[in-house]
Image (cartoon, helix red, strand yellow):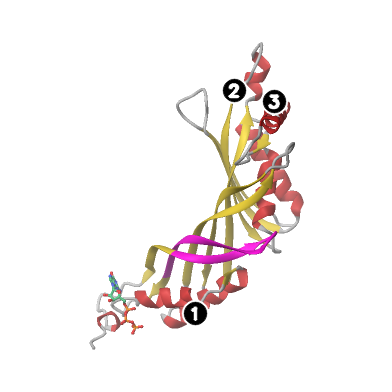
Amino acid sequence: MIDVQSQKDQRGISIQKVGIKDLNWPIVVMDRENKTQTTIAKITAAAELKGDIRGTHMSRFIEAIDELKVVGPKEIEKLLDRIKEKLLSDRAYIRFDFPYFINKRTPVTGTLSPLKVDCYFEAEKDQKFDLKVGVVVPVHTLCPCSKEISEYGAHNQRAYVTIEVRMKKFMWIEELVEIAEASASCPLYSILKRPDEKWVTERAYQNPRFVEDLLREVVLKIKEDGRIKWYKVFVESIESIHNHNAFAYIEGEITK
Ligand SMILES: Nc1nc2c(ncn2[C@@H]2O[C@H](COP(=O)(O)OP(=O)(O)OP(=O)(O)O)[C@@H](O)[C@H]2O)c(=O)[nH]1
């Protein structure tokens, strides 16, 4: 059968990334409490294509992904090596976007329920392997200004903390989530019974946070951790008294 993709291309234009996008695929990721967790990822995979070849071989990306067992740092690097090998390419790229569930106990009644956190792994390999891990953590913030100026009450809302890191040493997804939650006015829980609801309401009132406060608290904890070499933190507050959102962003390198 004729292999059109492998034909010579005369245009001499190499392509930085060509591949597949939005592949929904079951994956198994590492879970601190239960060893592993099965979830569904949306995957983008790509490779560099040399200027004298007509097309890439799309089916080979999926064949390479299909060999994955657990999606951890070592396995992602091996997957990129497989993609480079199967596609005769010098550079490969992969991104997994997936929901991850963390079982959390409420502070007063101890009710257990899963909290969904959107996560991603983004990796690239030429000679060197580069991996970024991201979490998008929903939290609760209460406005310090509103608390100060009002005779009673304070406006409060859900906010999302995106933490993206390059690590020197392995960290659990759960640990990144805990950094975000400990920096907020209060964490979120999927089930809250009334005694828990009273607790989170009062806890947030005692812990007011601007979007800037939350961002700075996260960055301080990242710098103290010792296992992170690069970070990007983005906080977005879904404002309850405005019809727009507030955000704050920092990106930085940790050299020592
Ligand atoms: N390169 C390329 N392939 C595409 C595109 N759109 C669809 N395809 C299809 O992707 C399919 C899989 O391609 P290949 O991996 O080369 O399939 P194959 O030749 O059976 O597999 P190998 O024998 O491993 O090369 C082919 O049927 C292509 O037609 C496109 O825009 N570019």
- Pointer 3 residue: 205
Query: What residue does disc 2 label?
Result: 155
Which residue is pictured at 66% across the width and 51% down the height? 176
Point out the tag, 1 or 2, that comes first from the N-terminus.
1
Amino acid carrying label 1: it is: Arg
Q: Which residue is mark 1?
A: 82
CA–CA distance between discs 1 and 2? 52 Å
Left or right position of 232 against 220: left
Magenta range is: 25-46
Whether 42 is drawn above or below 206: the answer is below
- Front: mark 1 or 2: 2
Q: Residue furthest top?
A: 151
Q: Is residue 185 above or below residue 68?
A: above
| N-terminal-most mark, 2 or 3 | 2
- Tell me the amino acid under the disc marked 2: His
Where residue 41 sits in the image (x, y, percent)?
Answer: 48, 61
Instruction: Name the element at disc 3.
Output: helix
Amino acid at pointer 3 = Tyr
Q: Residues within 10 Å of mark 1 (few under 14, many from 20)?
A: some
Q: Quadrant of residue 36?
A: bottom right
Q: Could you tell me how far apart the alpha carbons at marks 2 and 3 are, in whole angstroms?
A: 10 Å
Q: Residue farthest to the bottom?
A: 1
Image point 73% across, 38% down: which residue?
Answer: 109
Residue 160, percent from left and from top: 56, 41
**Residues at badges 1 and 2 in contact (C-beta under 8 Å)?**
no
Dot 1: element? helix
